[in-house]
Amino acid sequence: MSESSGQNLSEEVGPSALIYNLLAVIQNPFGVIRRRWIWMSLVIVLGLGAAAGLYTTSSPSYSATATVMVSSQQIPEEFVRSTVSGLDSMAEINSLLGEAFSQKFLLSLVEEYELYPDVLAASDAASVAALMRSTISVNPQDNLASSRRQREDPSVIIAIGYETSDPRVAAFVTNALAANVIDASIARRSAQARGTTSFLQRELRDAKLDLDKLEDEIGDFRNSHRGEMPADLETLLRKLERLDSQRNSLRVQISATQEQITQIENAEGVESSPETVLTDLRIQLAQQLSLHTDAHPNVLALRRQIEAMEDELGELNQLLLQADEGSDYLVDAARRELASLRGNLESTGEEIAALELRVARIPDISDELRSLQERAAVSRENYLEFLRKVQDAELAETLESAQQGPRVSVLDPAFPPSAPNNPPSRYLLLGMVLSLMAGAGVGVLLELVDPVVLTQAQLEAVQGPPVLGTLGRIK
């Protein structure tokens, strides 16, 4: 059966008929074009029209990229330890980028380069900033210092891009974004370093106040317990020993003085021996006178002895009178000495009791002093530790001001791109290709939905009974 003698089938066809129809389309595509050219042309024209409209209405966009490198600290940390958190993770880098791409900064770029005028007139500042933020791209790169050489130290490379319709503006804005990342990094690290130093300085002042307070307490404690410190124990013991010896000596002196007073008082009650002898001589004289006359030699001898004795006794009585007066003076002096010695003994005993009380208090005082000194030692260690930290923080702050710590630098600045990201000709070419494909698809679809019988096998697949004969093409 020829193409001209083929007939349209209105009834449904089975799967085998669809396969034969598809094979027929593949074998004779130009026949499909001749039969379905109207619908195919309509689809192609509509697709080309849409592509032409997109070509005329679209504007090219240009994307500029700057490379930023986050490098490690320039001076080894064993020499200077930084007090600022580094940029060792993407979370910290994203936090830095969030500060750098703030709404205020983005709006300043919008105003400087007159970006998004239509959107700015119809929307608020937050929407404009969000729109600009959506056109900024941030992508981590390989750890390369440039496209020509590779750094040995660990670092993070970030590509910052911005897309707009003007290539020069794209480069300017991208470089401004990269520069603001550097400024934000410097400001952030400097603020962190200053904040850390200020915090440690406040802690150092508090530690110094605590240390001074404890040292004042120790000084007051020493003054209030002067002479009762543990260091005074040996001196107090020696003094106690000396006072104890002094007390024993006073006791001996008191005993001797009392004995002396007793002896003086006993001496006044004893009769003198010359008076006794004189009495005896007078008794003998009376006895001799009773036996002899006054001229007897014994009587005369006794009278001479009595006269001599009386003369001697007169002188002796004079001396004894003077002696009695002297003994009274000695007794009074001895009693005054005794009173003085007893007073000294009492004061010595009181001083010994006071010293013994001070010695007894020394262990408790020593414990209290040790507790204060231990607290002062802890406070002093705390103060010295904060002093060391403040010195390290000040050195780290100096390091940050000299930009010798971990820093962000522009590795490759952005340049105006020479070609747009999405040239309009690309849309036109893509529209043409899609239009042709759509037209071909419509033709094939129509062939499958409303097939034309062209071959004997196709007819047998549709009708079922065998074909009895065929006619050739009629020209």
Image (tube, rainbow, N blue to C red):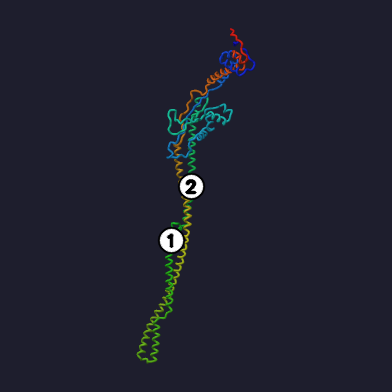
Q: Residue reaching furthest right? A: 11
Residue 112 or 472: which is nearer the viewer? 472
Earlier-in-chain disc, 2 versus 1: 2
According to the picture, the residue beneath numbered tag 1 turns out to be: 237
Percent x, y of residue 466: 61, 13
Q: CA distance from mark 2 to mark 1?
A: 40 Å
Judge left or right: residue 213 versus residue 320.
right
Q: Label 2 is placed on what type of residue?
A: Ala
Query: 253 above or below 61?
Result: below
- Residue drawn at 43 percent across, 57 percent down: 231
| Mark nearer the viewer, 2 or 1 | 1
Q: Label 1 is placed on what type of residue?
A: Leu
Query: 200 above or below 436?
Result: below
Percent x, y of residue 156: 47, 33
Q: Tag 1's secondary structure? A: helix
Q: What crowding class fits label 1: few (fewer than 14 Cα within 10 Å), some (14-19), or many (20 or more)?
A: some
Q: What crowding class fits label 2: few (fewer than 14 Cα within 10 Å), some (14-19), or many (20 or more)?
A: many
- Residue drawn at 45 percent across, 63 percent down: 352
Residue 207: mark in rendering: 2
- Residue drawn at 44 percent across, 62 percent down: 240
Q: Quadrant of residue 26?
A: top right
Percent x, y of residue 175: 48, 29
User: Split into 4 quadrants, where in the image is the C terminus?
Assistant: top right
